[in-house]
Image (cartoon, grey):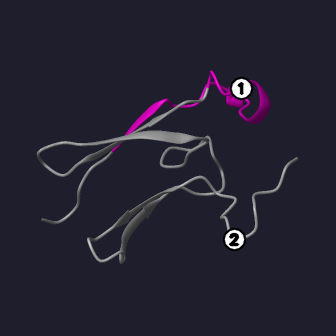
Amino acid sequence: MQHPPAGHDPVARVTVCDPDGKVVARFGGPDSILPGNFIAPHGLWCDSRGDLYVGEVIVRGGAVALLAPLTPHALQKFKRSGG
């Protein structure tokens, strides 16, 4: 198994920052096939309500065969809380 470069988090995640670079939210955790976690987050979209959509490139990158015992999600929605 390859290790990430020095200074990089080994967990695939999405971090949302404000314009000043302050972390507002983080999505993702160590168990990559559970909902809310990622194998290879790739595309981000936000709708008019502030909900965040995260797409992954899992099949083409070989992640299904190498990392996941079942077919993981390829698009996840994170509903904005509060505001």
Label 2: few (<14), some (14–19) or many (≥20) C-alpha neighbours in 10 Å: few
- The percent position of residue 77, horizontal first and vertical second, equals 34, 41
Query: Which region shows up in magenta?
Result: 59-77
Query: What residue did someone put label 2 on?
Result: 7
User: Residue furthest toward the right?
Assistant: 1
Near-viewer residue (57 or 19): 19
Q: Is residue 57 above or below residue 41?
A: above
Instruction: Report the residue at 69% width, 71% height from top.
Output: 7
Q: Is residue 72 magenta?
A: yes
Q: Is residue 4 above or below residue 33?
A: below
Near-viewer residue (48 or 21): 21
Near-viewer residue (7 or 37): 7
Instruction: Report the residue at 63% width, 46% height from top.
Output: 32
Classify residue 20 by image quadrant. Answer: bottom left
Query: What residue did someone put label 1 on?
Result: 62
Quadrant where the image shows the C terminus = bottom left
**Looking at numbered disc 1 in the image, what kind of residue is underneath it?**
Gly
Instruction: Report the residue at 74% width, 30% height from top.
Output: 69
Q: Is residue 42 above or below residue 13?
A: above
